Amino acid sequence: METSKKVETHFNREFREFDSFYNEKKGIFSKIIDGLFRRSMQMRFEKVIADTAPYENKTVLDVGCGTGRFSIALALKGIKKALGIDFAENMIDEANHLAQQFNVSHICQFVKADFMQMTVKEPFDHVFAMGVMDYIEDPVPFVKKMVEVADKSVMISFPVSGGIIQRLRKFKFEKIQKCPVFFYSRNDVEQIAQQAGAQHFTIDQLAKDYFLTIFLATEATECTE
């Protein structure tokens, strides 16, 4: 089974477990576990929300949107439009359900699609992929396309290589759940950005993630001043 199909199968099966991180009604034990092992997820969520500001008239493309939590949060902040794509149908169904629940379905559109195969007719202000590069076998073309369809910035998380947590995760995903997972050094992320054509970018470490921000057009000028 090819990598993308294995990932699709995994997330169609595990979508409720994936979304449980964002559930405010979790018990104290679950919150402690999240604090210990999922701190990166909270940090990158907060950074995407903060770095998209100001929100008025902004458009975003959420690549590998999962259950749409990033796009929905941004819609509640006042952005103009969010398009979320994911190739796991169960994720998309849940994202559309949540958009209706939060009364933002007029702002958020969630569709089942393969990012590398889809046609983007006009650029989005911000394009981001959070928790996606963990499952991308060939990251350079993926990042390059993100740059091509963005107008202001691209934001991408990469799981940090090394350490016991990463080894346990790799064993769990590849041996038990039959889903490939990939990890990156800081140098890997820098090389990927450069090979994808990025000229102005930053790499921040957020717990067990590297957070790559690629600045485009006027955003790049402001970043270097």
Image (cartoon, rainbow, N blue to C red):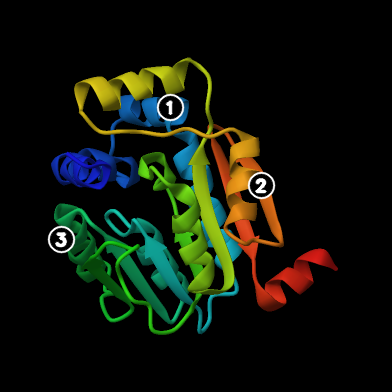
- Residue 47 in picture, x, y percent from top left: 56, 53
* Amino acid at dot 3: Asp
| Residue carrying label 1 | 37
Compute the Cα span from label 3 to label 2: 33 Å
Q: Residue at x 33, y 41 (%)?
A: 21
Q: Quadrant of the N terminus?
A: top left
Q: Is 106 placed above or below 204 here?
A: below
197 relative to 99 in the view: left or right: right
Q: Residue at x 15, y 61 (%)?
A: 93
37 relative to 97 in the view: left or right: right
Q: 109 or 169: which is nearer to us?
A: 169
Q: Residue at x 40, y 72 (%)?
A: 75
| Residue carrying label 2 | 203
- SS class, disc 3: helix
Q: 1 or 189: which is nearer to us?
A: 1
- SS class, disc 2: strand
| Residue carrying label 3 | 93
CA neighbours of label 2 inside 10 A, class few (<14), some (14 to 19), many (20+)? some
Compute the Cα span from label 1 to label 3: 27 Å
